[in-house]
Amino acid sequence: MTRRIPASTIRRLSHYLRSLEDLEREGGQTVSSEELARRGQTTAAQVRKDLSHFGSFGKRGLGYRVDELRVRLRQILGVDRVWKVALVGAGRIGSALFEYPAFESRGYQCVAIVDADPSKIGQTWGGLTIRGPSELESLITELDVELVILAVPAKAAQEIAVRAVRAGVKGILNFAPIRLNVPASVPVEDVNLVMQLEALSFAITQRGTGA
Amino acid sequence: MTRRIPASTIRRLSHYLRSLEDLEREGGQTVSSEELARRGQTTAAQVRKDLSHFGSFGKRGLGYRVDELRVRLRQILGVDRVWKVALVGAGRIGSALFEYPAFESRGYQCVAIVDADPSKIGQTWGGLTIRGPSELESLITELDVELVILAVPAKAAQEIAVRAVRAGVKGILNFAPIRLNVPASVPVEDVNLVMQLEALSFAITQRGTGA
DNA sequence: CTACTATTGTGACGTTTTTCACAAGCCGCC
DNA sequence: GGCGGCTTGTGAAAAACGTCACAATAGTAG
């Protein structure tokens, strides 16, 4: 039923979950793989194959029950609970993230903010006081932080990452444009806007020349 | 020499380019596929295969000349020139992006800012006046905007996208959590932080249960 | 000039991911 | 209860992607 799951499957599951939430708001009771495919920019067979990695959730001839599949997907993705997050780096990006509504509403709860800038330390954002970097480990331990959002300059990122992992953090969302060196048991997701812009300029350039 | 290029290859090229820039700063003259692989979290064979899609840039026995390969990669990725960008949505995310230094330094020049909030229209950011949504098309046409960064709420995103494309925009960096419906000839890159967080929680959850 | 070292470029191979096609199963109707 | 329309779940086929191994070749030393 499950072995190694492709990263692309996970991305699609995430998208199916969003579609199911939309469907629920629209009052849909059941949905077919065909319909999920249409909303997810993929194929019906792909939807069924993705889901089949984890079990069989549909009824032949009928499709999937929207509420049931939504619950199952939330379990699979591990978002059927609250994740405590520490935001490290209270600059522009950090501030934008902190106010990002999709964030809290999806179970990612920011319980600590850390920044190195002395003029920021002690400020409060939405009831949360910004702490200094020296408090990183104690905050993680005491508040049971499992995820760190790393929004600090490249130079500082590696050190923070190592310390956070040592303090017990289980995953990192990394905005610094470097490859973090952490144990393989700690997943890291890189957010790399420059790379995405370059993918755009490549696609546009290619279209003009190549074909 | 070139057919259809995998998206993963493009991502890696982007990373090689960054490594080459680092190497140049460090004063390196030449570099082997081995060294690029080490810095790029991949294998030497993969590096050579990626590059071979576009030509043969190295010297056997010697490796690649850093400056030369950097120039070639910039051509391939289409970043050997300035791209004019319009930022649509001057909220938290838009503001963070606008100040993101990696941005301008890599040839993405923001030439227009648009927002629907009347209290924002007329403000200036770094010498640029924020315009209302009605001016979208004229700004794109008159300033030769080729890329749009879409940092508006989900509800508004689709309409803006269509209008931008009609006005001649060639690519979109989309922060709205929806799948934009635009012609296939216009590449869209989605920035989806929730998806990346869900990939983390999946990886962490899986590690605990599965194995 | 030859031998030796280093490292690329690439065809052959293996693995992973996607697509295809269809039997199995559910539902409603007569 | 049997028939027909739908839609899933899944092996098998195809395609995409990554790895391997090695011939080709640049440079160097003797």
Image: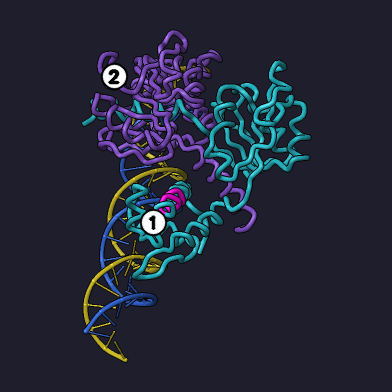
Chain colours: A cyan, B purple, C blue, D yellow
Instruction: List the residue tagged with mark 2.
Output: B140
Residue type marked 2: Ile
Residue type marked 1: Val
Q: Are marks 2 and 1 in contact (CB under 8 Å)?
A: no
Q: Which residues are magenta?
A: A17-23
Q: Residue at x 62, y 33 (%)?
A: A181
Nearest the viewer among A24 and B118 is B118
- What is the quadrant of the N terminus of chain B in the image? top left
Q: In the rendered image, is residue B21 in sight?
A: no
Say what secondary structure mark 2 lies in: helix
Q: Against B211, is B161 above or below?
A: above
In the rendered image, residue A129 lying in the magenta stretch gets the answer no
Spatial CA distance of label 2 from label 1 is 38 Å
Expressed as whole percent of the image width and height from the top left, the position of residue A150 reads 61, 31
Q: Main secondary structure of the magenta part?
A: helix
Nearest the viewer among A87 and D12 is A87
Q: How many marks?
A: 2
Q: Against A56, is B156 above or below?
A: above
Q: Residue furthest top?
A: B127
Instruction: List the residue tagged with mark 1.
Output: A47
